[in-house]
Amino acid sequence: MSAPSLPFGPDFPWLAPLAGYTDLPFRLLCREQGAAVACTEMVSARGLVYGARRGRGGDGGTRSLLATRPPDAPLVVQLFGAEADFLAEAVRMLLDEGFAWFDLNLGCPAPKVARTGAGAALLRNPRRALDCARAMIAAAPPGRVGCKLRLGWDRPVFAELGKALEDAGAGWLSLHPRFACQGFSGMVRTEALSELAGALSLPVLASGDLLTAREGADRLRTGAAGVLFARGALADPTIFSRYRRILRGEEASSPLPPGALRALILRHLELAEKFSPRPADGRNPGLLKMRSVVPRYIRHLAGAKQLRQDVIRCGSWEHLRRLVEEFFRL
Ligand SMILES: Cc1cc2nc3c(=O)[nH]c(=O)nc-3n(C[C@H](O)[C@H](O)[C@H](O)COP(=O)(O)O)c2cc1C
């Protein structure tokens, strides 16, 4: 199946994979703000394959992570797993369903993932990491598979592994230049990004501590082909448009004026109401999620604490919208 190529370059900021957050509504919101590519939350290769074997095309939770719509393109599906066979089968299944781009998670240090040998735990066993990547690459047309890695678990493997991944046919690499054992502590080693980007001819994307648009623009000095915004996009999805403005030499005012913030939150609510899953049992997981997302957007404003308390009791989209409107009327 042919697919247009993914956009790489300074002018094409990506939305990084963020478990629990980069669902369809949030991806659409970020695209409206200028994200050129978006990644799904990490998806279990094993969960997908077992679900399909049971005849449900993947268990419900795993499946809902793959919800998408035509404007949600280009979309990179991030897979995690430690077994080459499952990863390859997951890629084949997803290709059959029309997904085109895939990423192998080599960076998640969360115990739930690392305990199974997946995510950043694969950096303790670079040969296995390479086998997993090779299996995915072999299952897809050329250039469709990237890998997102850290420097290593607790010692650097990124340079050697990065070269081996390039030789294996990876289409791009993303590097969060911290060790997995650091979590989010300590400084990112931007010199590692320069080293990797300088050594390889495939695009190397920068991740890590890009919390503002300015930090994204500055990180291009490492020679990275482009940037992935993660926590910066969660705090303020307009980071993409601000970043693009900075690259054009324009001012990117900060913080977002209240009127624009109100419009952004209401738009996120609109997308969430329209595109969140609606389980048959009457639960409303989209609304529950937005009850925690909304207070995050306004956490720096007076009255944030009260709104956080109010949204806990909120039982409908209409009620949540009204609370937001009232908050900004004060
Ligand atoms: C809540 C959260 C969830 C994340 N989920 C994933 C994930 O599913 N896959 C992945 O490769 N990285 C994941 N990451 C890592 C981010 O994609 C990114 O590499 C990291 O946050 C560093 O960038 P930042 O400092 O600019 O946020 C996650 C990070 C956070 C904070």
Image (cartoon, rainbow, N blue to C red):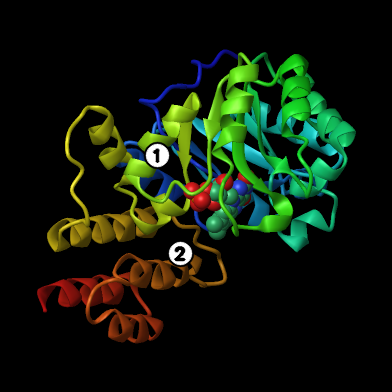
Pick whichever of labels 2 and 1 is earlier in the sequence.
1
Tell me: 222 left or right of 147.
left
Q: Picture coordinates of residue 187 (x, y %)? A: 56, 51
Q: Picture coordinates of residue 257 (x, y %)? A: 15, 58
* Figure quadrant of the N terminus: top right
Q: Picture coordinates of residue 157 (x, y %)? A: 78, 35
Which of the pair 183/28 is nearer the observer?
A: 183
Judged from the image, the secondary structure of the residue bearing numbered disc 1 is: helix
Question: Is residue 187 something that shows in the picture?
Answer: yes
Q: Amino acid at mark 2?
A: Gly
Residue at image location 34% in from the left, 53% down from the top: 271
Q: Amino acid at mark 1?
A: Gly
Residue at image location 49% in from the left, 15% down from the top: 4
Question: Is residue 65 something that shows in the picture?
Answer: no
74 to 151, vertically: above or below: above
**Can you tell which mark lies on residue 286?**
2
Residue at image location 69% in from the left, 45% down from the top: 107
Cα–Cα gap, marks 2 and 1:
30 Å
**Crowdedness near tag 1: few (<14), some (14–19) or many (≥20) residues, C-alpha within 10 Å:** many
Occupied quadrant, residue 262: bottom left
Tell me: 141 left or right of 32.
right
Residue that protrudes farthest toward the left in the picture: 329
**Can you tell which mark lies on residue 31?**
none
The residue that mark 1 highlights is 216
Occupied quadrant, residue 185: bottom right
Which of the pair 263/314 is nearer the observer?
A: 263
